[in-house]
Amino acid sequence: MALNIKNRETEQLARELARRRKQGITEVVTEALRKEVERERRKPPRQDAEDFFRRVRDIADHFNRLPVLDGRPDDEILGYNDRGHFD
């Protein structure tokens, strides 16, 4: 089966890599593609934006349903005084 490269830069890069590695063009292209496919396989599957935002909303809803364990204001919990400094 043939692969016809119609991009001059791509062809030049393949030939240069083959020359530098002292390998055939098919070998270097196969090796480069194999490495890239492996990288892609290790990546988590891409999500569409709608699914991503739905999951974020679900997480936020979950945390919003949790009980409040300490009703103090944030500054009081962190220890800030009325001037914004620690006591």
Image (cartoon, rainbow, N blue to C red):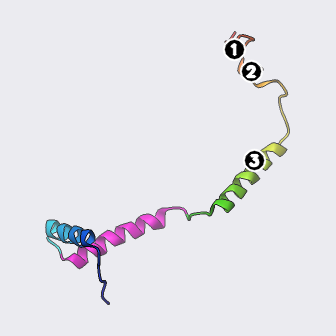
Residue holding disc 1: 84
- Disc 2 from disc 3: Cα separation: 22 Å
Give the percent coordinates (x, y) of residue 25: 21, 76
- Disc 3 from disc 1: Cα separation: 29 Å
Residue holding disc 3: 60
Q: Secondary structure at mark 1?
A: loop
Image quarter where the N terminus lies is bottom left
Amino acid type at mark 2: Asp
Give the percent coordinates (x, y) of residue 15: 19, 71
Q: Are marks 2 and 1 in contact (CB under 8 Å)?
A: yes
- Disc 2 from disc 1: Cα separation: 8 Å
The disc placed on residue 75 is: 2
Residue ID at (18%, 77%): 24
Image quarter where the C terminus lies is top right
What range of the chain is rendered magenta?
24-44
Please tell me whether residue 46 is drawn above or below residue 29 in the rendered image. above
Comparing 75 with 7, the one in front is 7
Give the percent coordinates (x, y) of residue 3: 31, 84
Q: Secondary structure at mark 3?
A: helix
Please tell me whether residue 62 is drawn above or below residue 19 in the rendered image. above
Residue 75 falls in image quadrant: top right
- Reply yes or no: does residue 3 show up in magenta: no
Residue 12 falls in image quadrant: bottom left
Amino acid type at mark 1: Gly
Mark 1 packing: few (<14 Cα in 10 Å), some, or many (20+)? few
Mark 3 or mark 1, which has the lower sequence index?
A: 3
User: Would you say 85 lies left or right of 32 here?
Assistant: right
User: Would you say 40 lies left or right of 34 here?
Assistant: right
Q: Main secondary structure of the magenta part?
A: helix
Amino acid type at mark 3: Ala
Please tell me whether residue 57 is drawn above or below residue 73 in the rendered image. below
